[in-house]
Amino acid sequence: MPAEDIHKGHRRRLREKFLKSGLAGFHDYEIVELLLTLGAPRKDCKPQAKEAIRRFKNLRGVLAASLEELQQIKGIGPHSAFGIKLMQEVAREFLKEKIMEKPFCKSSREIFDYLYHAMRDRKKELFKVIYLNSQNQIIETADLFEGTVNSSAVSLREVVEGALKHNAVSLIFVHNHPSGNPEPSASDRELTRELVYAGEIMRIKVLDHIIIGDNRYFSFADGGLIEEYETDFLNLKLRGTSEAKRRLYQARLSSGKL
């Protein structure tokens, strides 16, 4: 059988497998191979797909690679590289639309998935803020600072002004750790505490601060730290007041009416 017919049959089987069960059971190189066939429908793309996985480690690495990096692999031309980058952007836009339709409290993993590819390979820390409305739906996402993230670098005034500009009721903060380890530093904890305090003063709730590492993340909300900082602020606010008033404020805080 001619080599062209063999390749054609292989491509057809891959596509039929995808149409039947999606990407379940696919190896990373097979997914890349499928993407490459869109730009080179009559060419055997398996060698290039395997080389791309070898060079960039996994599917995420291939999708995160630049056009120039992809075209350094022999056999991947501008059309095939364009197809891969287009697929990445379509997937990212889909996730963005998806999470904007859902309350954050049910979609924290989706927020991580949406931001992961954009932040994982950065050499510097990037600090983002997500503005949310009263239904906890995303209004806008903005970059606030690039560099070493700490309480002196991030402007609390800019955070508050942005929230007021977007009529935000609550906020989520996200930044990356280029080291790959998402565990919060002392500076991360100090900054988050100050952001929570500023939010309490302005009556803008901080829902979370997520630190993105290498395929994993740390959530201050999941770790109970956001609630701890809110309680600390309340204790400072109520210092010297009566026990009855303290209980009233605690009840309002628990009900979200404070």
Image: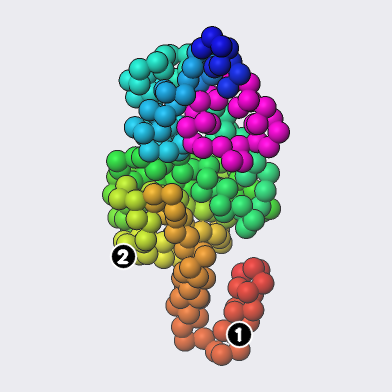
Question: Label 1: how many residues lie within 10 Å, few (<14), some (14-19) or many (20+)?
Answer: few
Identify the residue at image location x=49%, y=36%: 28
Q: Which residues are drawn in magenta?
A: 11-35
Tag 1: residue type? Arg
User: Can I make out residue 246 in this image?
Assistant: yes
Q: CA distance from mark 2 to mark 1?
A: 31 Å
Tally the numbered discs: 2
**Position in image of residue 196 (x %, y %):** 47, 63
- Position of the N terminus, as image quadrant, is top right
Residue ID for mark 1? 247
Q: Is residue 132 left or right of residue 231?
A: right
Instruction: State the residue in front, 6 or 54.
Output: 6
Q: Is residue 52 above or below residue 57?
A: above
Identify the residue at image location x=35%, y=21%: 73
* Residue 186: mark in rendering: 2
Is 169 contained in the magenta span? no
**Position in image of residue 67 (x %, y %):** 39, 22
**Position in image of residue 25 (x %, y %):** 59, 41
Q: Is residue 66 above or below residue 211?
A: above
